[in-house]
Amino acid sequence: MAKLVAIIAVVILAVVGQHICRFILALNPFHHTYNHSPGPCQQVPGITTGSEDLALTSTGRVFVSSGPDDRHGKLFTMDLNSPDVEVSQVSIQPESLRDNFVPVGISVYEDPASKEIRLFVVNFKSFEIETFRYDSSTNTAHHIKTIKHPLITSPNDIVATGPDSFYVTNMSFFSNLIFVAFSLLTFLPVSSVTYYNNGEARTVADGIKFANGINMSPDGQVIYVASPLERGIKVYHRRPDNSLEFKNDIMVYSAVDNVNVDPTSGSLWIGAHPSFWQAVGSKSPGSQVLQVKHAESSNPVVTSIYANNGKELSKSSAAVYHKGHLLIGTVSNKMLHCKVNIPI
Ligand SMILES: [Ca+2]
Ligand SMILES: [Ca+2]
């Protein structure tokens, strides 16, 4: 009997020990970030309450979600073709929508025929999706509708596939923030991807530890899902019926947040937290931007384009690149613009 108890105790200790080791590895608490940048960088005036996610149109216009620390969330836009890289706040109509609006994940859908731009935005306050029609002549986002569904439990990011269809990541199958945090901290693989189309939804990927950013290859054939706890990007083949088939993981060894895809080259641009532990517990954690070339192939090439120990930029969560300009968004403070002087 004593021998059996000893064996059980050793097994329990081994399982708990393994979990603790994986926990420390994923949180990466002792990481030191060495600073480097691809060229001169400066803060974008006008953004102080975060720029959690960025979305780039095919013509070089960027949309910015801003507001985790502001009860009245904002959207910004800027044109990266303009000689002066200036940001302007998008008017949201109706204005009352901003009262409970905490925008995080954002995606742009450009209608191939009409060129109409639709914005899909995750509202972190309500765990719902808000959709807008963007009018560039008045710089206004006209609210179309609020989307809620039992399979959209705790959304983080979204990628539009049509005027009323998208993939969205759920951080957990819980909707209560305390349970969501519990499932993240215990590394439970209860995170998923839901496909939504015109009122209908289904789970198309699950068993993920904290699905965060999501995006799609330019040809629409590949879906990328960021998993900061697994420190990599999960790659899925998109089937004709919109279900997903897991292909492989791209390990980047950083707590990846949002993913953007270069509409021409298909390269991934990732805003990441070098240390998940510091991102959660430190006042000014570091920042990192990663580029992944050939992401859809069996030989992806991962390059660190920008890294900072937190003094210049803290909590980087998203990045986009367009014609020599790099924009880096953050969870809850400023946004950085870098002129890129290195080969990309
Ligand atoms: Ca996004
Ligand atoms: Ca995110």
Image (tube, helix red, strand yellow):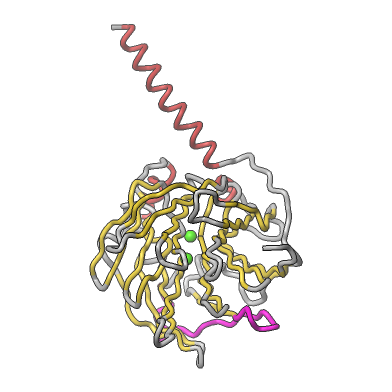
Does 131 lie within the magenta span? no
- In the image, the segment drawn in magenta is 79-99
The answer to whether residue 1 is visible is yes
- Rendered location of residue 93, percent (x, y): 42, 86
Residue drawn at x 57%, y 51% as measured from the top left: 279
170 vs 267, left or right, is left
Q: Nearer the viewer, residue 306 or 86?
A: 306
The answer to whether residue 52 is visible is no
41 vs 197, left or right, is right
Q: Nearer the viewer, residue 253 or 170?
A: 253
Q: Nearer the viewer, residue 219 or 225?
A: 219
- Rendered location of residue 57, percent (x, y): 51, 76
Extreme residue in the top direction: 2
- Rendered location of residue 107, percent (x, y): 45, 71
Residue drawn at x 45%, y 84% as measured from the top left: 134
Q: Is residue 285 above or below residue 14?
A: below
